[in-house]
Image: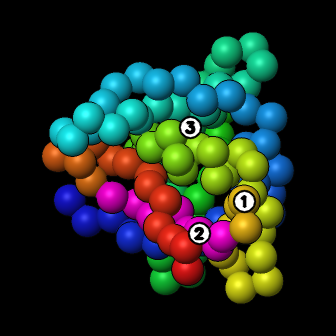
Amino acid sequence: MSIPQKPVASALLLATAAPLSFRATSRDRSGSTLGVLLDASGAQQHLVIEEGGPEGSWMLSSALPRGHASFLLYESAANVLRGGNLSDDGAISYQGALYTIEASLDGNTRTAKVSGSV
């Protein structure tokens, strides 16, 4: 299963993620927490990769778009998305450091994890 490794984050993604909450749904093989983002009504906001550019871009959607797979987020990735600001170089500035959100696989589970400080 091949997935882009470093989709691009956008200011719109961060603005959309800011008011959302994180709900733990499972653990990865090493025991780290994975989960989803929820809006104020409790509806899941699916994190997907939208086509475009060499690696695609991260997008949040209330309904899973046809032909897309939803990614579970590591809690650290959810925190960076919800609390970060887009820097000039496309990285996400969060608590004094720069990060990117990478796509990865944990077995057959698609995950979004923090990579940084870049």
First along the sequence among labels 3 and 2: 3
Residue at point 79%, 63% (across, down)? 85
Which three-letter amino acid code belongs to the residue tagged 1?
Gln
Q: Residue 5 at x, y = what percent? A: 39, 70
Foreground label between 2 and 1: 1
- Say if residue 56 shows up in the picture: no
Circles 3 and 1, Cβ within 8 Å, touching? The answer is no
Nearer mark to the viewer, of 3 and 1: 1
Q: In this view, does 46 lie above or below 50?
A: above
Q: In this view, does 48 lie above or below 35?
A: below
Secondary structure of the residue carrying numbered label 3: strand
Indicate the amino acid at tag 3.
His
Pointer 2: residues within 10 angstroms few (<14), some, or many (20+)?
A: many
Measured from the top left, where is residue 25 in percent x and y? 41, 23
Q: Which amino acid does label 2 sit on?
A: Tyr
- The magenta segment is 97-104
The residue pinned by badge 2 equals: 99
Residue placed under numbered mark 1 in the picture: 95
Secondary structure category for the residue under label 1? loop
Q: Which mark identifies residue 46?
A: 3
Q: Which of marks 3 and 2 is in front?
A: 2
Any part of residue 83 in sight: yes
Quarter of the figure with the C terminus = bottom right
